[in-house]
Image (spheres, rainbow, N blue to C red):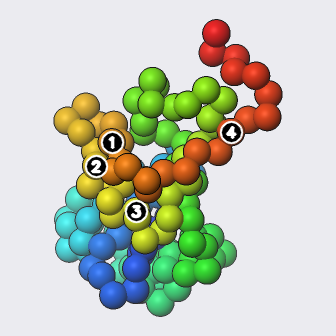
Amino acid sequence: MSHTIIKPTRDEDFYVVYSSVVDAPIRCGSRAELESTYEHAAADRFARADETGTSSKLGWFGWDEQSITVREGFRPDAYPANAWAAVVARTDLRKLCESVDSSGYWNPPEGIVTWEFFDEEDDRG
């Protein structure tokens, strides 16, 4: 499965479903919300996320990872030239998730995204 449940902070009932296909969160909410809307919301996955910060059996996105890379979900014109991804602090994942507009794009509050850039020239024209 290409989805990982991330628990951004230990003391909050909030989870993010991260897709490694699009390298971005695809769902978020409380455990109860995700259990009622997310088809892969198995109890053992939430238990692992509660214990380690991630449902990944390999430990990807666990408590030791303080930032998460987000590649999709921003408006095309929101990416700075040569940017290939945004980096969001683990503790800011909720703010990112709550910034989705009615068109489904991220509109993160100022300062929670750091852009990663290609070293090459922009090929978008």
Q: Quadrant of residue 33?
A: bottom left
> Where is residue 105 drawn, in percent x and y?
33, 37
Crowding at mark 2 (Cα within 10 Å: few <14, some 14-19, many 20+) = some
Q: Amino acid at mark 3?
A: Leu
Q: From mark 2 to mark 3, how far is it between C-alphas?
A: 10 Å
**Residue ID for mark 4:** 117
**Residue ID for mark 1:** 107
Tag nearer the camera, 4 or 3: 4
> Where is residue 14 drawn, in percent x and y?
30, 73
Q: From mark 1 to mark 4, how far is it between C-alphas?
A: 19 Å
Mark 1 or mark 2: which comes first in sequence? 2
Q: Amino acid at mark 1?
A: Asn
Residue at the top extreme, as displayed: 125
Disc count in the image? 4
Q: Which mark is residue 88?
A: none
Q: From mark 4 to mark 3, how far is it between C-alphas?
A: 21 Å
Instruction: Please give the name of the residue rendered at 42% of the width and 36% of the height, measured from the top-left corner.
Output: 74
> Where is residue 32 drawn, in percent x and y?
20, 73
Left/right placement of residue 19 relative to residue 27 reads right
Q: Quadrant of the N terminus?
A: bottom right
Q: Amino acid at mark 4?
A: Phe
Q: Which mark is residue 93?
A: 3
Q: From mark 4 to mark 2, how far is it between C-alphas?
A: 23 Å
**Residue ID for mark 2:** 99
Q: Quadrant of the C terminus?
A: top right
Mark 1 or mark 4: which comes first in sequence? 1
Dot 2 falls on a residue whose secondary structure is loop
Mark 3 or mark 1: which comes first in sequence? 3
